[in-house]
Structures are given as C-alpha cells and as structure tokens.
Image (tube, grey):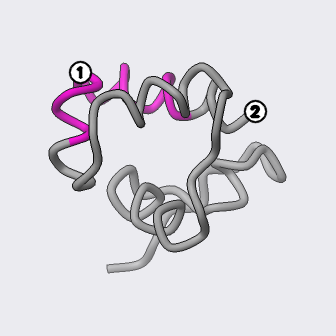
Amino acid sequence: MFSTKLKELRSLKGSTQEELANILGVRQQTIGKWESAITVPRLPMLQKIGAFFNVTTDYLLGRTDEPGGFQK
C-alpha cells in the first residue's frame, strides 16, 4: 500500500524519483525500492514523507483513505 501511495503522491506533485530523493536526503534507488515495495522506510522517514506531501503516516500506510494533512 505504501508503494502505491508514494508513487501517486509523487506523480501528483510532478516530481521525479531523483527530485524526491534529493528533498528527502536519500538515493534515487531508495525511492525506487520503496515504490517497488521492496523495502519501506522507518518511522522518522515516513513522518518526513508525510510532512512533505502534507498527509498522515496512516494515509501513507493505507490505514485510512483520508489524507488528513498537517496543521500549519
């Protein structure tokens, strides 16, 4: 579920895997592994991804269909 959500969100933002990797401070291959469901990020990175896309970690993990978002 995470892999699908990440691909979806990245596409909606119009970002490449390389651009997202640079923003998150990881390698492009890491984004590829996440999007291929080979690996999943640990909680601190999930939180960083959620903050970047303005969605909750529950949404990223498929626990809810509501993106939620963070209050600013």
Three-letter code for the amino acid on which mark 1 is drawn: Thr
Q: Nearer the viewer, residue 35 or 51?
A: 35
Residue 7 within the segment the image draws in magenta? yes
Binning the other alpha carbons within 10 Å of mark 1 as few (below 14), some (14 to 19) or many (20 upward) gives some
The residue where tag 1 is placed is 16
Q: Name the residue furthest bottom.
A: 72
Say above or below: 67 vs 37. below
The prevailing secondary structure element of the residues shown in magenta is: helix
Screen quadrant of the N terminus: top right
- Left or right of 37? Residue 7 is left
Q: Position of residue 34 (x, y in %)?
A: 55, 33
Binning the other alpha carbons within 10 Å of mark 2 as few (below 14), some (14 to 19) or many (20 upward) gives few
**Magenta region, residue range:** 6-21
- Left or right of 33? Residue 63 is right
Query: What is the CA distance from the residue labelled 2 to the residue labelled 1?
Result: 19 Å
Q: Of the residues under marks 2 and 1, which one precedes in the sequence? A: 2
Screen quadrant of the C terminus: bottom left
Q: Name the residue furthest right.
A: 63
Three-letter code for the amino acid on which mark 2 is drawn: Met
- Left or right of 30? Residue 63 is right
- Residue shown at 63% from the left, 61% from the top: 57
The residue where tag 2 is placed is 1
Instruction: Using the rendered view, name the quadrant where residue 13 is placed.
Output: top left
Tell me the element at label 1: loop
Q: Position of residue 53 (x, y in %)?
A: 38, 50
- Residue shown at 76% from the left, 43% from the top: 65
Mark 2 touches mark 1? (CB < 8 Å): no
Tell me the element at label 2: loop
- Residue shown at 63% from the left, 45% from the top: 40
Q: How many marks?
A: 2
- Residue shown at 54% from the left, 25% from the top: 35
